[in-house]
Image: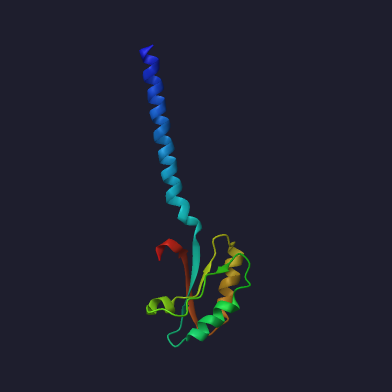
Amino acid sequence: MRRVSRAAGFAATLAAVATLAGLAGCRQTANLSKQEVVVQFTLNATQADHARVWNLCQHVAGTTPEPLVTTSKHPSTLLFNVRYRVDHASNYQLQQLYNCLRQDASVKGFSSGDSSDN
């Protein structure tokens, strides 16, 4: 009978460890669904250019423009203030967004990645 209780204890411990490992894995991959595209502008682009691009590409399905910050004491915030969430965008929708962004001469490029990197 003692052997059965040890086996049951071992099984319970093993189940607990497996559950904790699974939860830790979920936490590690939770941010993978938070994807964004950050627009990079030419050096002489104005905030009016930023606002124009922000408005220009809002129609692309699968993308959501993040709020446009137009006042900040941090220059980098204003430099990279045009961002689109693309958590659920297909490759086709991403390509539509990239094509839309390329239409404006003030856009130098764009980067995409995990929004938790910022």
Residue under the image location 38 percent in, 29 percent down: 13
Give percent across and percent down for residue 57: 59, 75
**In the visual, does 64 lie left or right of 117?**
right
The residue furthest bottom is 44
Q: Is residue 56 above or below residue 36?
A: below
Q: Position of residue 94 (x, y in %)?
A: 57, 67
Quarter residue 103 falls in:
bottom right
| The C terminus sits in image quarter | bottom left
Residue drawn at (41%, 45%) of the image: 24
**Foreground residue, 37 or 79?**
79
- Image coordinates of residue 68 in percent, x first then y, are 51, 75
Question: In which quadrant will I find the N terminus?
Answer: top left
Above or below for 9 versus 110: above
How many marks are shown on the rendered structure?
Answer: 0
7 vs 95, nearest the viewer: 7
> Measured from the top left, where is residue 62 in percent x and y?
61, 64
Query: What colour scheme has been applied to the protein in the rendered image?
Result: rainbow
Q: Residue at x 55, y 77 (%)?
A: 54
The residue most toward the top is 1
Q: Is residue 15 above or below residue 30?
A: above
Q: Is residue 82 above or below residue 43?
A: above
